[in-house]
Image (cartoon, rainbow, N blue to C red):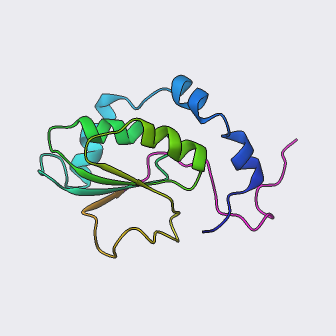
C-alpha cells in the first residue's frame, strides 16, 4: 500500500475525537447527490465509498432504504478502525487508496463517492509544512 504522509497520519491520529466532533452531512445535500449518481431509489446498488474516513457519509448511505452494498475504502488505520467498530449494515471496510484497492474487483461499483478527503498519498515531498 502507498504510505500516508506523516503529517496526515499524525493529524488524524485521534480518529475517535475526529468522529465525535466532526459534523455529518446535511440531509438536503444527500438526495440530489445520490440522484445525480443514479443510485437514489435503486435497491442493493453497489457503492464504493473512497477515503471513507470514520464513516460520516458511510453511515448515511448505510441507513438508507435502498439497502446499499457498500465497500468503504480507507488508508488511515485509525480512521478505518473507528469505522469498523460501528458495524454498519451492508458495509465492508477495507484498506486502500484511489490507486490501490486490492479488495475491490474492477467494475464492481454502480457508483463511487468521495465525500471529503483530508489524506493524500505521498512520497514525502507533497505536504509541505505551512506557515
Residue furthest out toward the top? 21
Q: Is residue 118 visible?
A: yes
Q: Nearer the viewer, residue 126 or 59?
A: 59
| Location of residue 18 in the rendering, given as x and y in whole percent from the top left corner | 58, 31
Image position of 121 with respect to 85: above or below: below
| Location of residue 33 in the rendering, given as x and y in whole percent from the top left corner | 30, 45
Query: Residue at 55% across / 23% down in the picture?
Result: 21
Query: Residue at 68% across / 39% down in the picture?
Result: 13
Image position of 60 with respect to 101: above or below: above
Q: Nearer the viewer, residue 5 or 31?
A: 5
Q: Quadrant of the C terminus?
A: top right
Location of residue 63 by image quarter:
top left
Query: Residue at 52% across / 43% down in the picture?
Result: 81
Q: Relative to 65, is 59 on the left or the right?
A: right
In the rendered structure, does residue 130 fall within the stretch colored magenta? yes
In the rendered structure, does residue 29 fall within the stretch colored magenta? no
| Location of residue 10 in the rendering, given as x and y in whole percent from the top left corner | 74, 43
| Location of residue 90 in the rendering, given as x and y in whole percent from the top left corner | 25, 47
Image position of 74 with respect to 61: above or below: below
Query: Residue at 12% across / 46% down in the picture?
Result: 41
Q: Quadrant of the N terminus?
A: bottom right
Residue furthest out toward the bottom? 106
Q: Is residue 55 visible?
A: no
Chief SS of the magenta region: loop
* Extent of the magenta region: 113-131
Q: Nearer the viewer, residue 112 or 19?
A: 19
Amino acid at each position: 500500500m502507498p504510505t500516508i504522509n506523516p503529517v496526515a497520519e499524525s493529524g488524524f491520529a485521534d480518529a475517535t475525537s475526529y468522529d465525535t466532533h466532526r459534523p455529518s452531512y446535511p440531509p438536503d445535500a444527500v438526495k440530489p447527490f445520490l440522484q445525480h449518481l443514479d443510485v437514489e431509489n435503486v435497491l442493493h446498488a453497489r457503492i464504493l465509498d473512497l477515503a471513507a474516513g470514520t464513516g460520516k457519509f458511510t453511515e448515511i448511505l448505510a441507513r438508507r432504504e435502498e439497502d446499499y452494498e457498500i465497500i468503504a475504502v480507507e488508508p488511515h488505520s485509525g480512521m478505518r478502525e473507528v469505522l469498523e467498530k460501528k458495524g454498519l449494515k451492508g458495509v465492508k471496510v477495507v484498506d486502500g487508496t484511489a490507486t490501490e484497492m486490492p479488495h475491490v474487483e474492477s467494475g464492481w461499483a454502480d457508483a463511487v463517492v468521495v465525500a471529503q478527503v483530508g489524506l493524500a498519498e505521498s512520497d514525502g515531498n507533497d505536504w509541505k509544512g505551512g506557515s
